[in-house]
Image: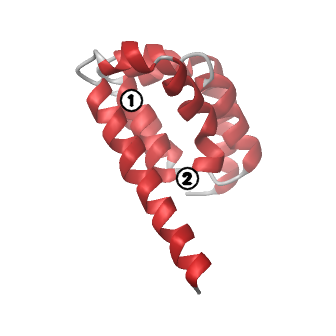
Amino acid sequence: MDASLVSKLLEKIKIKLYQISTNPYGTRVFQKMLEYITHDSELEIIKEYVTNNVFSLVKDTNGNHVIQKILQIYPNEKNSFILKEIEENIVEISKLKQGSCIFQKVLEYSKAVDKVRQFSIKN
């Protein structure tokens, strides 16, 4: 997909990203779009949209998949805003059915990063 097309689409839909993320069809479209976001300026739009909405998205059946996808495809230094909000709402999130999926992704991808760091230190 053309990078400029992704930027243009993101610019047009950014004010509706929450509604798109919580829609059964929109969530799939947005998750696919996340795979093509490569520029920091595009990621900043995502960050602006997601910050302060993480808990609401985690609670939503469709929105939690967007959070999982961000955790999956972006390194910890790029998704720390999500990790921070999860940490702040850890008790409430742990009580949610979808919360377990979020915790699994956090652990899964942070372990992978730690393994890479350990390997880098040894070599």
Q: Quadrant of residue 22?
A: top left
Question: Which x, y percent locates residue 48?
Answer: 69, 26
Relative horizontal placement of residue 6, taking residue 41 as reference (left or right): left
Q: In 3D space, how far apart are the residues under numbered discs 1 and 2 (Cα atoms)?
A: 15 Å
Asked if 39 appears above or below 99 in the picture, the reply is below
Q: Secondary structure at mark 1?
A: helix
Q: Residue at x 31, y 25 (%)?
A: 99
**Does residue 87 appear in the picture of this structure?**
yes
Badge 1 vs badge 2, beta-carbon distance below 8 Å: no
Q: Residue at x 66, y 32 (%)?
A: 47
Q: Quadrant of residue 102?
A: top left
Q: Residue lying farthest bottom? A: 123
Question: Which x, y percent locates residue 111?
Answer: 42, 56
| Front one among 115 and 3 | 115
Q: Which label is found at residue 62?
A: none
Relative horizontal placement of residue 41, taking residue 13 as reference (left or right): right
| Front one among 67 and 94 | 94
Circle 1 is placed at which residue position?
Answer: 27
Q: Residues within 10 Å of mark 2 (few under 14, many from 20)?
A: some
Give, as a three-letter code, the residue at label 2. Tyr
Q: Secondary structure at mark 2?
A: loop
Asked if 95 appears above or below 118 in the picture, the reply is above
Q: Residue at x 28, y 17 (%)?
A: 96
Q: Residue lying farthest right? A: 41
**Total numbered badges shown on the rendered structure:** 2
